[in-house]
Image: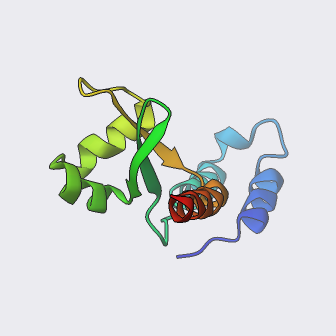
Amino acid sequence: MSVDKKAAMKRIIELTHSENWQEDKEIVAEVQKLGKSMWAEKPKRKTPRKIAIWHGDRILVTGTAEQLSEITGLSKNIIWDRARSLWIDSKGRQFKYVEEKKWISLHNTVTSSSRKS
């Protein structure tokens, strides 16, 4: 169920305009219903986020958590946790999320530098 958030917010403002709106159970119920429908929706990613594994100042590998899981033997959840916390593991690897714009320029840089070698 897609909710028009602007319309829902306008309706909430209309309903809560008076100071004693909380005393009317019908108004409270409608405000709660509108609020739940507005903020319960969580946007889902259409494409998985890219993660880079760094060792010092070098990128070892990039890919989705699923791809990196196959390469490293770590679970996807561990990879996501490490990317979120920027934690450096005992092997000196640091997992970082790569922003889409940076991913494109990073990919171009990596491919162009690998061609020079």
Relative horizontal placement of residue 5, taking residue 93 as reference (left or right) = right
Occupied quadrant, residue 64 = bottom left
Relative horizontal placement of residue 93, taking residue 10 as reference (left or right) = left
Q: Residue at x 57, y 61 (%)?
A: 116
Occupied quadrant, residue 115 = bottom right
Of 70 and 35, the residue lying toward us: 70
Q: Residue at x 29, y 55 (%)?
A: 68
State the residue lying farthest toward the front. 117
On the image, the x and y values in percent for residue 104 come to 62, 63
Relative horizontal placement of residue 100, taking residue 51 as reference (left or right) = right
On the image, the x and y values in percent for residue 50 come to 46, 57
Of 11 and 65, the residue lying toward us: 65
On the image, the x and y values in percent for residue 71 come to 21, 56
State the residue lying farthest toward the left. 73
Question: Is residue 69 shown above or below 74?
Answer: below
Q: Residue at x 50, y 33 (%)?
A: 57
Question: How is the protein colored in the picture?
Answer: rainbow
Occupied quadrant, residue 88 = top left
Question: Is residue 108 shown above or below 29?
Answer: below
Q: Residue at x 49, y 46 (%)?
A: 97
Of 83 and 41, the residue lying toward us: 83
Question: Is residue 54 shown above or below 47?
Answer: above
On the image, the x and y values in percent for residue 23 come to 66, 39
